Image (spheres, grey):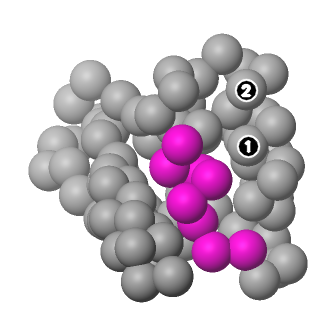
Amino acid sequence: MQAVKAVNKIKSETMYWTLELASYLEDAPWPATKDELIDYAIRSGAPLEVVENLQELEDDGEPYENIEEIWPDYPTKDDFFFNEDEY
């Protein structure tokens, strides 16, 4: 039993997000449940890492409102320092 707990703990610590991986969820149908996000990732051809990360999310039955609820460090437009009027 302890071996199973150890494996589960290691598995849960392997979830990671990068800008590239998170970008596959930008057009997801928000708000969405964990299962809906997994389905979307599979149907949209996201890499296996995205699906695996989504499978490791907690599932309390409540939908996720946006990517920031999944990856709190997801950069927003406010994180970039450029003036859009110049371009």
User: Which picture quadrant has residue 12?
Assistant: bottom left
Residue contact at pointers 2 and 1, CB within 8 angstroms = yes
Q: Residues within 10 Å of mark 2 (few under 14, many from 20)?
A: some
Q: Which mark is residue 42?
A: 2
- When the figure is inspected, residue 65 is found, relative to residue 74, above or below; the finding is below
- For disc 1, the neighbor class at 10 Å (few under 14, some 14 to 19, many from 20) is many
Q: Position of residue 80 (x, y in %)?
A: 20, 49
Closest to the observer: 86 or 4? 4
Query: Which residue is at a point 30% across and 41% down the rendered structure image?
Result: 18
| Residue at the (51%, 82%) spot, across then down | 1
Give the residue at x 45% y 41%: 22
Residue 32 in picture, x, y percent from top left: 81, 58
Relative height, residue 86 to residue 54 (above, below): above
Left or right of residue 24: residue 59 = right
- What residue is shown at x 79% (from left), y 22% (from top)? 43
Between the residue at mark 2 and the residue at mark 1, the CA separation in whole angstroms equals 6 Å
Q: Which mark is residue 38?
A: 1
On screen, residue 22 versus residue 85, left or right, reads: right
Residue 23 visible, this orientation: no
Dot 1 lies on which element? helix
- Viewer can see residue 67: yes
